[in-house]
Amino acid sequence: MSLDISSLISEFAEEFFSGDISAVMDEITSVDVLESPSDDIAAELVSDRSAYEKQKATLQTYIDSLPYECESIDVMQAKLEYIVGKLIVCAKSKNWLVLTTWDAILQCWLQMRYPMTTSTRATLVRFYYELCLLPGIEVRVIRSWADMLYRLLGSKTVKRKLEATDLQLPWKPLWDVLYKELFPKSRLAEFQGNRNLNNILLYVAESCKRYFPATDIPDMLETFLPILTPDTTLTMIPVLTSFLPPTHTHIYLPVIFRIWEAFNSHIMDDRFLEFAGILAEEHVTGKEGLAREEGGAAWKDVGIWTQEEWLMLVSKGIESLYVPVGNSSQNITATAIQADASAARQGSKVKKTISRISCLAKLFVYSMALDGPIRGDSVSTIGSPNNQPMGYLAGSKALDSLDKLITSTESFFHPSNSGHWTFTLTNLLQRLTVEFADRWLEEQQPSCKTPVARRLTPSLRRAFVNVLRTPAFLAMFSKDSFSISMAQGALRTMALLEPSLIMPELLERAYGGLEVVNETHRTTAVLKMLSGISLPLVSERIWRPGQKHLLPLLELCLPGIDLNDPNKTVCATLFIVSVMQHVKVGDLSMHHSGFALSGDAPGEELMEVDTEDTHIPEGVEMSPFVSLGRQEERTLVRESTAGFADWVTSLFRRVLALYENLPEEGGKKKTTGGKTEETVLKSIKSMLDVVTLHLSDQLFDLVLNLVFDYAATNAKSNAIRAFGQLVACLARAQPQKTLDKFLPSCISRIQEELKYGASSVRTTSTHDLVPSDTTLHWNMTILRGCLAYGAHALLKHKEDIINLLSLLLNKTKNERGYTGTAAIVTRVMHALSGVYPSENRFVNKDVWNQPEFGGSHNTHWGRLYEAKDVKVEWHVPSTGEVQFILDILDRVAAPALDKIENLARFTQHWDEVVRNDFCRYLLFVRSVWSGLPSFLKEGPKDVVHPCLDTETELEGLLVDHLDVKAGFILTDLNDPRYQQALQHRIRFGNVAHLAAVALRQIQGGEDHLDAVVAVVKAIDTYFLDYGMSRTDFITLQKNFAESREVNRVSARQKENSRVAWVKRAQVYHCGRLYIHALYRRRSSLDDTLLKEDLVELCLSPYTRVRRLAQNVLHSACGSYVRATRYILPSIFNALSKGNDPDRIKGALYVLGNKGTAALTMSEPPLRRQYLVALLECQHEEKPSIQKLVGTFSTECLIHLSEEVIRTSAYTAPAPGVEASIRTLEEEFSPAVIDGKLTKAAMECAAKRAERCLEETDKTVRSILEIASRSTTHWRYVHIAMKFLIGFLRRDAVAPPELVRFFMEQTLSPQPGIRASAEQAIVKTAVLMKIRAYSRTDDELWLCKWQSPFARTISINNPPAFLAQLYQPVNEVHGFYVDLLDTGFLAWTKTIKCYPVDLTNTVPWDSASRQCLQAMRSFIGEGYFTQLATLWSQESSKASGSPHLHTENVVFMITLAKLFNGEHMHLILPTVEPLMIDADKFKQAAAAEILTGLLRGSKHWPRQTREELWSWLIPRFDVILTQAKPDTVSYWTSFLEHTLLNLDPRRFQPLVNWILSLHLDFQGDSAFSMTKALNIIVVFIDSVGVRFNGVSEKYTSIFFDNANSNYAEIRTSIANALSLIAKYQWRPAYPSVDALLTACAKSPDPLQIRQGFFSYHVQSIIDNLPKWKDERFPPPRVSQSRYDKVGLTMLLWLWVSLHSPEACLVRPHAMALLPELLSMSELSDNPELQKYSSAVLRVFSSVHLPPSLTHIVLENLVSAIQLSESWRIRLNALPALVVFFYRNLLTISSNGVLKIMDVLLDCLSDENVEVREMSSKTLSGVVRCSQRQNIIPLKNRFISLARSVKLPSRTHHDYGESLKKLHSAILGLCALIESFPYSVEPWMPSLTEVLARHATDPPPISTTIRHCASEFKKTHQDTWHKDQLAFDEDQLQSLSTMLVGTSYYA
């Protein structure tokens, strides 16, 4: 079997979980997106055509687009049966690794897009699902199966491949496999490392969740909810969202929302928002959808959400935008992210990248419907401030919410206000439009199941576009390119949805941006924008007035083509390409004779008839963007096309001018200039390609002559390549004309140049151009351009071309010359032999050639096709062209091979001349073949070295390539032409071999490196230029995907541009070719080239040769079956002693390649050779080799695990897989099973397993032998140790000598080796234990074994059960409950416990006893003394915080458990002196040993335990008193490690000691006080819920002592309170049903609104005013009781708000709100002020349930209204703004009115700062929700301003009047600033009011000036239009506002 193609598997595996799962190979699967059945979808519905028929129709469009006949469906069905037959045999014989190679073949089959019946697909999915559940299989293999599962299910783009009715899968087995990954046993977890299996399995669950039976939902909740606790949320929430089927949502949504609101977690927000988005889309059809009445979600207030749920969703959405509202300079970092980080104990290993913004967009779009009264246009209605607007925008609640969200963040879209939020916001715009267009298109289709009343309507669509329009126009000029492209995407979609709303404004900006010269940023942004909206611009069907703007815009963008501004050039070419691909460039004005020609326009009937009277009243200036009648528009367009000729000539002249200014060509790759120039040239080439293709004949001739004249009179050395590209563009458009024009003159010039000695100086390495050769290269590059396309045109000049090739081959002698010749021959061969589309125009060839089209092509501009209507024109080689190729092979290539043969035979006298000839001729022949990848189809080969191990492998299961038709030219073995070509190819291979052999014999190899490199490249061509290479194929796919997206709004759109369909056909053809390049067989010549030549070259002393050869070798091994096996012996050979270091290095690189390493490590015999070879490399001293050995030995560790061994020797029963095989067999014909093969495979299976285990034992012995040698360097001992740990496995006990070796190394002086040895002993012991406990294979691998000490008891009465845990344990019948991982939301039915009185022992088998004996014999008298000495050494790794070494602790636990404390008498005396030693490292060692002993004493005999306690108890006080600041953390860690997840009653003496500690809060030494306090805090955190018995007592102590003088103590108290609340919070319900009922009915089912410390907090609140009066004067103010208690409370709130359980502190925070506000004004205590403001800000930004918002609002408002201090008002206003934004939708209309009243009061505050702050706040509030009150407010402010006359400064009323006037002015400015980007009708008149006061004394004048400058900044983009709203006086007033009055006025 071959994993050589593992590159295939590993590459998609690499990408698999990195985020987006569209793996590389899946790019082709994404062609699904264009699925467009040839018949109308309506027909499909009426006749209910099956999915199979639909697939057939899709396939037909693919097959019809190819130029050759493809296989019939029956033939491909037979191939599928063949593949499935092999899969079944592999599965039956449990040969998993061979099965994965057949997966890849199935993948190839799927890539061919043939239909598969639903039942077949369902059985295959079931098969792969069962495979993913096999326990103990290597992760890499499971990952490939999960990927296969995903491919079979297909991504949902248009329609799902399988519905829930077609397939049911069991979820429980998947949960069993996943459970052990999510919650691994503690000591096992260390060895699983970072293997990602949990993410793969969760991904499988997510892919399959809709196939889990909906009837199992209660079971799932019954399973998942009881084990969801605050410590497991990050793990369990992804489980919930991945498993729950998306139907019957009424069962689980209430509980999900309750859990969501109770936790503060970023990951949870991600998951639930994604879930909500999926559900919103899934249930947009309500009960009419697939889930029908019982499974569909009912419509509620907004979509399928209740009002409360909707508010929560939108609130979380607003939070996700991270917009710094409330003019807070620093952004509020989301507390949720910090909360997740603090919940690190469960260290969520579950990772998934979720795009929140996409989910949010889905949520909004799929919740839209007409579900409320329509809101009138309320801005103009005048009324009292109370007239709240009734109804919703366009009658949709969801759209109304979206409108509020966008309005409130509108100013953040402006480029002047950009920040990290810009990308998020623009991304939201883009995703919203994409989702909207998708839903819109879906609802246009007859098959749509959404009830008509719930569908989107045109009025909704207009409103939607209106909401998003302004922000998109603002973001169009963003500062970063990502945001620009997002805004561009949004505008593009909107322009297609509502062109009349978008296009006029866009074009206005476009003209503005292209006409300004000085702002290049705007120009490039506009050009990018225009390229996005090319379709509405050119297609009269979409937007009629667009076409006439085409030429003016094209002319304006010509100056953009400028070498000095590469960015602008690229943008300009992009725009030209995007419009030109939809247009024929031809002058229509000469056809201008009435409108008769326009009658046959396509889509005439689609056009709306002009009914509206387009007559424009006189005296009105006509806007260029108004739509005229169709005929007038067409007339204007036809007249404008007269400018095409001028435009095209200026374009080409501009390009030629740019070419003249290019830098000189040069460098290794002969590039022109640097990267930027290359990019510019590339973009110009693609532009010319499109333009020349769409030129009319007259214009083409014009351009051809222009270019020909230029070519004849110039030869520019700096533009040789570029000019060649230009000619190639012409040749591509019209090959015959171009060739006839250029060929004769080029040939004659080339002959002349060669005659006079051009390119005659011999060289073989790259060099700069020789000036005298310029003309030769100029003409060669033109020739290369001409010959690249249009093979039929070449035939006419056949003799000329052959003669020319011979001439060039023999005469061009310098490197530049002969590589040019090689490039020409490759182009010619490719043009002649390739199967490729011959033209890419925007309409079919027959339409293009119609005379009528030439006369009225403007009516066809922007035409889109359906797949079935496109006729692709292909080039397929004719007989003449095949003969032409054979003639070149005979007449030019064969003589060249003769020359090479001669040179290779006589290697004694190699000099420069010979070397030059050799390189030249070899390059030429290689280039001939690299131009013929699809010329010859490989026939069957005689495989001389199959590399099969006949005992354990079968020829019949060797992977076979999928033979599909792929347009190869010569396929018939009996065709004489085939034989002729085949002989040429074989000869080429032989000559390459001959040359390689010859070069190995030459002395002075360094001189001939160029020749060696040439040989490597020739071998590369021989092996790999066949079919299609992977990289080329992927490039094509990406290219197709891009062109497909350009003109498409949604995946549902059936129409696309013709270019996209042509590319699709090409990708499909290339996919067939690519399949041929995989899994090829090896002939004896192939073997010779591989082993004798390539391998030798890989070991060359020259790095350049070695690297190149290794790349070729890896690619060849990926294409040829078993090639890696064949070369490995030679590679291992090169590693042996006595080889040259360079050979060793080469061999290491070959073996270290990821693909090769994966193969060698999966085959037991190869694995042994590889590992031993690595370890034997220590004889080589070269540092670079040692570094490589280090790297590769670490890399191969991931392939060393018990699963890898088990995968290749799997013998356990697999009932699930066997059941799925039976259904597969029933699905296919009986012939699918090859009985003989199955029988042989079953026989081999047992041998294979046996051999594998033998080899594994042999490997372990070999490695152990090397590691035990005295001469082995310690680094290699360490590597060997790591290898050996990898070989430890649970199904076999380690041999005693291995254990002995590990024990010896636990005393190694090298810390690294010691740590590994400790790990090894732990792993040995744990696996030994598991094996002793497990009775079946499943128990062993699914971690379901039962400990002989444990019992399971059922929990019938949870409160009584809990109470029992608080009581001391009964010595006779009592039991310990170690892990309490349930009982938070509900209780599990049973729980595991351990009886106190243990009588059992572990049932060890004899092998385990030997192991134990080996360990025991090593532990002698001095063992622990030595160990303690080593552990107490100072560690070399400088770590920040002192901590215990986990590996030491776990090692100690293991020894204690294994030997039941029999060594205690040796250990305790060793620990005694360490505990009291001043050296902190010795104390650390003591803490590690004691932790290990205590935790390991779990099952010791009672007497031994009591001895241990009697020794320990008196020493606790000693430890505590002597702990210093640098050692105290060791002892707190000791407590934490000891108590965590064990029943504290096991350590009753320790617990009693801790609870008896005296807590002193007012002593002198802060350290000694915090020492005891920290012990309590650690204790609370470790024992968790079980602290609740005494928590009330401690809570009182902490609150009573909140006034401590020391910051450390205050922090500890804050932490302790936060923890106590966390563990007291247990809304545990007796059953899951009770929980579900409570969540559906009760207002607070999870008890998060009650507050656990209300009594204590209330008493503090009652006392605070009294304490405030008693505050000390500065500087002793911070000693006041008020300040100290205040700080403790603030710290507690701060810590709690940043924890996952933030909701618990909410009631207390609300109670403390007024106090927080009053603390924020105390400027004499900066710390108090800082904390109170911070807590205020965080609190006002958290999500609150609607029922609580009004309470907080009341508090904030009354604080501002009632407080006497202006500072409080100043601090409360920002909090009010943040609060207002965050709860925008929840605040009732009365609440908003209260806010308005407060702000209007504050406008006239005594303090200027308060007034200004309230003005800012007012503008935001008005913008978001008070537009209907603008007119009354405006009138109020104007009358106030008019009523105030400022008296003189000395007047006693001056201050009061100034305040009044300032408040009026601030109010008016607030109104102006509330509409930053538009000019409302009421605005201009305000300028006159404000201008009058522009010279008033400050602060009035400064306010006015600031307002005017802001106005100018925000309106400069649209000023050309906005200024029309002002009359002359108002404009004058505006400038007065900006500068005040003039000095001269």
Image (tube, rainbow, N blue to C red):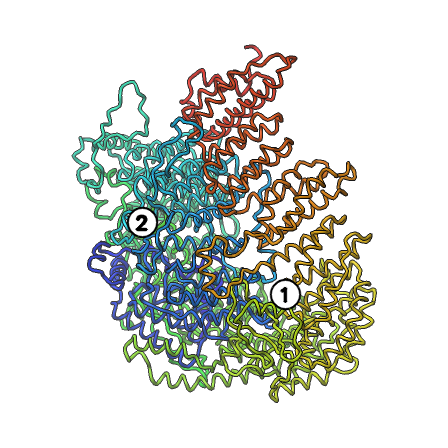
For the C terminus, the image quarter is top right
Q: Nearer the viewer, residue 1278 or 1824?
A: 1824
Q: Give the Cα distance between marks 2 and 1.
A: 70 Å
Locate residue 1510: give its quadrant.
bottom right
Q: Under tag 1, what secondary structure?
A: helix
Q: Nearer the viewer, residue 1065 or 291?
A: 291
Q: Compared with residue 354, is residue 1838 higher up or lower down, i.e. above or below?
A: above
Mark yes or no: residue 45 visible: yes
User: Which mark, residue 1059?
Assistant: 2
Q: Nearer the viewer, residue 171 or 476?
A: 171
What kind of residue is marked 2? Val
Q: Is residue 471 left or right of residue 861?
A: right
Mark yes or no: residue 993 visible: no
Q: Residue at x 29, y 39 (%)?
A: 542
Provide the residue designation for mark 1: 1586
Tell me how many marks there are: 2
Image spot of residue 566 (x, y percent): 48, 40
Outermost residue to the top: 1944
Image spot of residue 535 (x, y percent): 32, 41
Image spot of residue 863 (x, y percent): 27, 44
